[in-house]
């Protein structure tokens, strides 16, 4: 959004007329302003307007008349939140960045995977461009309403988790279970599979992981093609998700083997992502986990023991006091050899399994 001399008029020669019509349809307004004019109309400095624009993920457009009344309104709203003292300037920029990054991925997915399929020419001789505009015109209001609905639902769920935290510090630095699930041999697969097949495999993996994580009460943090990162408020939930992922993938012959690494501890949350030593440890455990297996760190294992989800040892699990029901454990933990892990020193991994129910006594 800078006002250098490099920008040409975005409505100049060479721009696809259909692209311009689609843009106007989607934005609901015509291009009217240069970046400088938009900043002046919004009552903000050019410097702040540029920070907001770049934070939302948009390229500089020089002195092109590329902005609309909606862009002016967005700048005015963000600046108004700062002026009212509701947000600091840094926080307003962060709001712009987090919203831009999230919706950019959503928009790319909808165009690449959704819209392209719908706009296949229905009759021989028709071009995709001839059917794109009416399809977008029909879909736009429905997708907009659905986006707002899902956002409100997610906002309510996130706000509910935050207000239940014990103190203000836990709103940012919280104790969570963090897990990475990684497809084994993905790099080799990329050399053997066609691009379309590879895309279908990745989409199937991400869809399976997202559904399992959501259904069991976890939170999908991000997907990285051959790897997903998720978190859960308690170790038992994270463990159940990990084992179900392994079991589900093992039952699908089209899927590679999977390995999962998990850690439990203090995690810093920022813009929907998670950071810290706990996250790094989970990543390292994933890299050394056996195929179709789950490795957890010592703190994760102790948390399962503390909550009664796993026995401290098989000997402890076998103990049964007269007249008492034997304890019912969901998981089994097997200590592995301690080993050095790059950047984290020596760690004590534990192999996590689903506990086999004890046979009925004679």
Image (cartoon, rainbow, N blue to C red):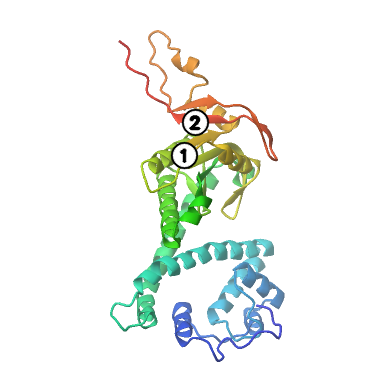
Up/down of 118 relative to 257, above or below: below
Q: Position of residue 12 (x, y in %)?
A: 56, 90
Up/down of 134 relative to 270, above or below: below
As helix, strand or loop, the secondary structure at mark 2 comes to strand
Asked whether residue 186 appears in the rendered view, the answer is yes
The residue under label 2 is: 352
Q: Residue at x 59, y 29 (%)?
A: 298
Q: Nearer the viewer, residue 329 or 269?
A: 329
Q: Check if mark 2's residue and mark 1's residue have beta carbons within 8 Å.
A: yes
Up/down of 202 relative to 31, above or below: above
Instruction: Please identify the residue farthest to the top as the structure is shown.
Output: 322
Q: Nearer the viewer, residue 90 or 347?
A: 347
Q: Position of residue 230 (x, y in %)?
A: 51, 46
Q: Say which quarter of the image contains residue 36.
A: bottom right
Label annotation for residue 233: none
Tell me the quarter of the image containing the C terminus.
top left
Q: Position of residue 77 (x, y in %)?
A: 58, 71
Tell me the quarter of the image containing the N terminus.
bottom right
The residue under label 1 is: 242
């Amino acid at each position: 959004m800078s006002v250098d001399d490099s920008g040409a008029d975005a409505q100049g020669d060479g721009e696809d007329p259909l692209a311009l019509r689609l843009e106007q349809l989607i934005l609901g307004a015509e291009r009217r302003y240069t970046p400088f004019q938009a900043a002046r109309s919004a009552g903000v400095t050019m410097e702040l307007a540029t920070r907001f624009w770049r934070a939302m993920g948009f390229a500089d457009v020089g002195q092109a008349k590329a902005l609309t009344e909606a862009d002016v309104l967005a700048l005015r709203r963000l600046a108004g939140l700062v002026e009212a003292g509701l947000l600091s300037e840094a926080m307003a920029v962060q709001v712009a960045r987090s919203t831009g990054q999230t919706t950019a991925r959503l928009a790319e997915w909808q165009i690449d995977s959704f819209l392209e399929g719908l706009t296949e020419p229905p009759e021989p001789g028709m071009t995709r461009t001839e059917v794109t505009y009416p399809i977008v015109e029909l879909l736009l209001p429905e997708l907009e309403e659905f986006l707002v609905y899902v956002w409100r639902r997610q906002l309510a769920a996130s706000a509910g988790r935050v207000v239940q935290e014990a103190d203000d510090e836990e709103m940012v630095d919280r104790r969570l279970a963090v897990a990475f699930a990684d497809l084994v041999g993905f790099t080799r697969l990329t050399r053997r599979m066609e691009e379309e097949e590879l895309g279908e495999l990745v989409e199937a993996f991400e869809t399976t992981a997202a559904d399992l994580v959501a259904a069991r009460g976890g939170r999908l943090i991000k997907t990285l093609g051959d790897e997903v990162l998720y978190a859960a408020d308690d170790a038992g939930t994270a463990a159940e998700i990990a084992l179900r992922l392994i079991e589900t993938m093992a039952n699908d012959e089209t899927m590679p083997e999977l390995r999962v690494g998990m850690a439990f501890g203090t995690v810093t949350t920022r813009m929907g992502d998670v950071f810290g030593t706990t996250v790094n440890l989970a990543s390292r455990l994933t890299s050394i986990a056996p195929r179709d297996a789950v490795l957890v760190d010592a703190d994760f294992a102790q948390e399962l023991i503390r909550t009664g989800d796993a026995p401290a040892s098989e000997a402890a699990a076998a103990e049964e006091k007269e007249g008492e029901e034997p304890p019912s454990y969901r998981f089994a933990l097997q200590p592995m050899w301690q080993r050095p892990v790059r950047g984290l020193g020596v760690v004590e991994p534990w192999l996590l399994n689903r506990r086999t129910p004890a046979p009925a006594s004679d």
